[in-house]
Image (cartoon, grey):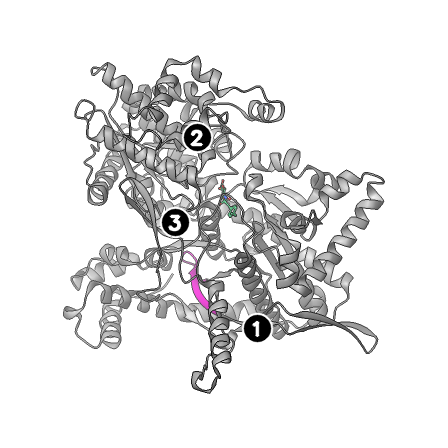
Amino acid sequence: MLNISKKTFKKDYVKKFIELHGKELEEGTPQNKYETLGTLVRDYIAEMWIATNKKYNKTQEKQVYYLSAEFLLGRLLGNSLLNLGIRDICKEGLAELNINLEELENLEQDQGLGNGGLGRLAACFLDSMASLNIPGHGCGIRYKYGFFEQKIINGSQIEAPDNWLRGGNVWEIRKPDKAEIVKFGGEVKVEMIDGNMTFIHINYEPVLAVPYDTPVVGYENQVINTLRLWSAEPVSNEFDFSSFSRGDFLKAIEYKNSVEAISHVLYPDDSFYEGKLLRLKQQYFFVSAGLQSIIRHYVKHNGDLENLDEKIAIHINDTHPTLAIPELMRILIDEEGLSWDDAWRITTNSVSYTNHTILAEALEKWPVDMFKKILPRIYMIVEEINRRFCEELWSKYIGQWDKISRMAIIGDGYVKMAHLAIVGSHSVNGVAKLHTEILKKQEMQDFYYLYPRKFNNKTNGITHRRWLMKSNPKLTKLLVDTIGDSWIKHPTDMEKFENHLDDKSVLERLQQIKTENKIDLAKTIKQSSGIIVDPNSIFDVQVKRIHAYKRQTLNCLRVMNLYNKLLENPNLDIVPRTVIFGGKAAPGYFLAKKTIELINAVADKINNDPRVNEKLKVVYLENYRVSLAESIIPAADISEQISTTTKEASGTSNMKFMMNGAITIATLDGANVEIRDEVGDDNIVIFGMNEREVLDYYKNGGYSSWQVCNEDERLKRVTQDLVNGYYSPDKEKFKTIYEHLLTYNDEFFVLKDFDSYLRAQDKVDEIYRDSIRWQKMAGVNIAHSGIFSSDRTIQEYATGIWGSGFLYKNL
Ligand code: 26W
């Protein structure tokens, strides 16, 4: 907690404003004022930051490095103020200077360096590590362009570059003196020097990795951890173009461009893996720079590499940073002179790996030729890891060649990154119970039998500081008023709220808060899409990446069906609904982009049909991102978590919604299963096929979407409406969706689950009419959401995987 009075803050603020902008406060633009506040807060942080680092160096506590290709932080100002404990003082101080804090907060560009769940999880984890006093730091790429901006034009997604650094970034500090060199291409010369085999990398292309550090502020505990993001630059910045001959000049430009390309843009895919050279370069770039700087720091402060694994933990977020394994081997062997065996012991003891998806099409594998050419020394090390691993397999599984070749790290011309990650780490975890079980039983079964003790579950979580305290201040206040504030540091204390759910005044306040949040969202919707929605209708929300397995199509088909029903019977007695969608499609994912077009076509027709408008509206919110999520989620009545069972590893928006009092309608997939276990069957609406049925169909076949469709008049009608011109004069427009469902037998069982989904929606309607019951359900969901705080998740990682943060074991 930062100790600062309102008076001092005001003085500091005005002084900083003048320093930065050379004019008086009254003349400042809102942007000037935001920049001033951000810079001032960063200054406040600076001293604590230095003190934290000093303490870490002195106590030699185990340091955790969280390696991730993505960190989806969103905005930093509001949460930094909250965690510093000075948000109220700043708010009041600014108000006295005629400045509205929230307006400044809304001027901040989202830091959108991630695709979705995996990147946002990394951001929640940073917040929790700092807040739990765990010395844990992020390591990633400072993409010049983050996840693209989505525009919806004539109902279709158009991508625009996310130039997030345009207006500067007050949070980062460039550290050129901490730069590292990363080497690509070239050859490896093997020489005997003093009787030792020595590997010398020659003719490589050097890339300068320059770190930018962002402070990660712990909640009222004086801890500031570091997120270090690397930017790629040419090794020499001094291009004296005039002294180059023409050939050199062009070469120099080419070199500069190829280097800068590495940290230019985040790949906007989270569905289909593509073996792109630049992506491989990105992965090696940040992993190599990160590890070199970690080891350099370690050697400076600790010296002895022999017990490195007791002093640092390296976590790899999915397979994207798997090259950390061979890179650490390279540093320990080639640069520090350790033996293979010592290096291997240290590496495997340090590294741990999280898997985030079982979708086969998303598994990373790199063509050997590409790998070898771009990372010759690393390839040699991977080959040696593979050779030794296969040797182990041969002696264990005598004669079982199929199994051995299935499990090898290198095979069929590819390097299989998940295999390398499992073999080269001491811990492999899934992100929800069901997901971990599926990994063990199906996807990674061979490895599970070989290394049963490596496998473990760590159910995901979300930071309640951003997703409740910051985004829903009214609900936060209600909780504090009724149960006190112990839950802020011990989120499972939220359970106490359940004791107050027989108090009518509490339920009324819950409802009032939800309505006020809905009014705010209705304004946002009006501003961004022009659509007027009724805050008294049910706000029914599905926001997430657009993907076939997440089944936005199922949601859309039920809206189309409801529309048909309302037209048939205008007096149909339903609670009015506002169905809200949001999310981005990968630019190359045709079916996902078509899904967006379909939702918008359906929305357009329904919203312009006065016959149904009192009862049904459909909204597609453009450019879904962290900051938008913060205003949508507190306003949701219903959380749509409707993925095909077995396909969603965990989901995390499901947790955010329940924490804000939405009722979940869900399949028993990912963490929905654990949410159900927490709140009980009466406080969640479950539908659809279970795990066994899905796995059985995938294994044995026997599903016919065509037959399911033919036996259901409603389905016949809505699927025909896709291709008969009902939603578009161009009958071909939604043919791909139709074909996916009927010609190609509906891979994700949309039609199969349709009936059960509709019945679940009817049930929601029925429950909502009983306002007391609904608010109680909302209350139970809030009360049981504490377990899904990422503080719980991080404590499990710290004690179960990293062996760090012992101070907090007894929290
Ligand atoms: C194209 C390569 C690729 C493939 C998969 C890039 C990124 C991915 C990620 C693993 C996708 C992802 O974000 N997975 C999500 O991770 C969340 C955090 O664990 C889970 O909650 C989601 O269920 C899971 O889909």
Upstream in sequence: badge 3 or badge 1 = 1
Upstream in sequence: badge 2 or badge 3 = 3
Q: Secondary structure at mark 3?
A: helix
Q: Secondary structure at mark 1?
A: strand
Number of other residues with Cα within 10 Å of mark 1, as a class: few under 14, some 14 to 19, many 20 or more? some
Residue topped by disc 2: 642
Residue topped by disc 3: 465
Q: Which-is-in-front pick, marks 2 and 1?
A: 1
* Quadrant of the rendered image containing residue 629: top left
Front-lying residue, 203 or 632: 203
Magenta stretch contains residue 572:
no
Q: Secondary structure at mark 2?
A: loop
Number of other residues with Cα within 10 Å of mark 2, as a class: few under 14, some 14 to 19, many 20 or more? many
Task: From this view, report whether residue 663 is shown above or below residue 172.
Answer: above
Q: In the image, what residue type sits under mark 1?
A: Pro
Q: Position of residue 588 (x, y in %)?
A: 44, 45
Front-lying residue, 793 or 440: 440
Q: Residue at x 41, y 38 (%)?
A: 592
Q: In the image, what residue type sits under mark 2?
A: Ile
* Quadrant of the rendered image containing residue 16: bottom left
Kindly identify which numbered label has been placed on residue 206: 1
Left or right: 220 as drawn, with respect to 769: right
Q: Position of residue 47 (x, y in %)?
A: 41, 71
Q: In the image, what residue type sits under mark 3?
A: Arg
Distance of mark 2 from mark 3, alpha carbons? 26 Å
Upstream in sequence: badge 2 or badge 1 = 1
Q: Which-is-in-front pick, marks 3 and 1?
A: 1
Q: Is residue 58 visible?
A: no
| Magenta residue span | 211-223
Distance of mark 2 from mark 1, alpha carbons? 47 Å
